[in-house]
Image: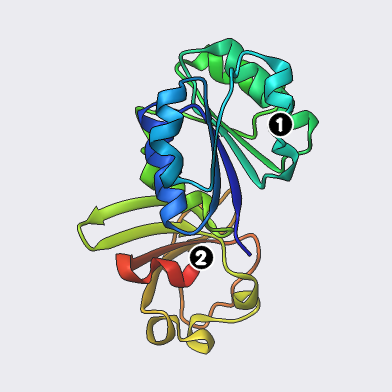
Amino acid sequence: MKKSVAVLGLGNYGKSLAEKLYDMGADVLVVDKNENLIKEFSSKCSAAICADLCNEEAVAALGLKNMDVVITSVAKNLTASIIAVAVAKEQGVPLIIAKSSSDRMSSILLRVGANKVIDPEEEGGVRSARILMSSSFKDFFELDDNMYVVEMAPKKDWVGKSLLELGLRKTLNINVIAIKKKGGLWQFVDSKTKFEEEYSLLVVMEKKDVKKLN
């Protein structure tokens, strides 16, 4: 089932994230007050709406309750960010992510309902898109032009089974190089260790194989 994602604000980060999510198959709603930008971006998303994110009524009318994820990417406008996060929270959006420009702003957005804040200096739109499109990915790093390192939770059908039983290298062309329990340290994984839900896995894979895990 496709994920539905709303990207509120089309700055450089918002455009990069929205376009990549759409390319990866998500239903993407983009919102910005710049009408020309909305027209320009309309072919790169599922729906594009021109609206003032500082207007609570306008944000409430967007239908965010139908979204799996809402991302606010208006870090230069604290008022718009607060309104968008608060409305999304009130409408029951499961995952609310907010772009922030400072520690103080991050603290405020978390208080009003954001599940996670993103520092644009540390995270790019493409990387964020990969994490959002997978229910398993926790973090995501580009090793080089053809290789990724991914921190992920075991998929449901992996729990209770070992690497030896799953044969992930053969079936998915991925290599689990380390494992850790919640609150613990990374350690090399024994091929006979059975995965548990609270484990985190460190996986190396080729870019072409990422979609197999989404």
Check the image and name the residue furthest to the left.
Answer: 145
Q: Secondary structure at mark 1?
A: helix
What residue lies at 39% left-to-right and 28% top-to-bottom? 120
Number of numbered callouts drawn:
2
Task: Give above or below for 44 relative to 193.
Answer: above
Q: Which mark is residue 214?
A: 2
Q: Secondary structure at mark 2?
A: loop
Alpha-carbon distance for marks 2 and 1?
25 Å
What residue lies at 63% left-to-right and 77% top-to-bottom? 157
Residue 24: image location, x then y, percent = 44, 58
Which amino acid type is shown beneath numbered disc 2? Asn
Residue 210: image location, x then y, percent = 40, 66
The numbered mark, 2 or 1, whose residue comes first in the sequence reads 1
Whether residue 206 can be seen here: no
How packed mark 2 is, by other alpha carbons closer than 10 Å (few <14, some 14-19, many 20 or more), is some
Residue 178 picture quarter: bottom left
Residue 45: image location, x then y, percent = 48, 46
What residue lies at 67% left-to-right and 44% top-to-bottom? 67
Label 1: which residue? 88
Q: Quadrant of the N terminus?
A: bottom right
Task: Give above or below for 138 relative to 193.
Answer: above
Residue 83: image location, x then y, percent = 67, 18
Which amino acid type is shown beneath numbered disc 1? Ala
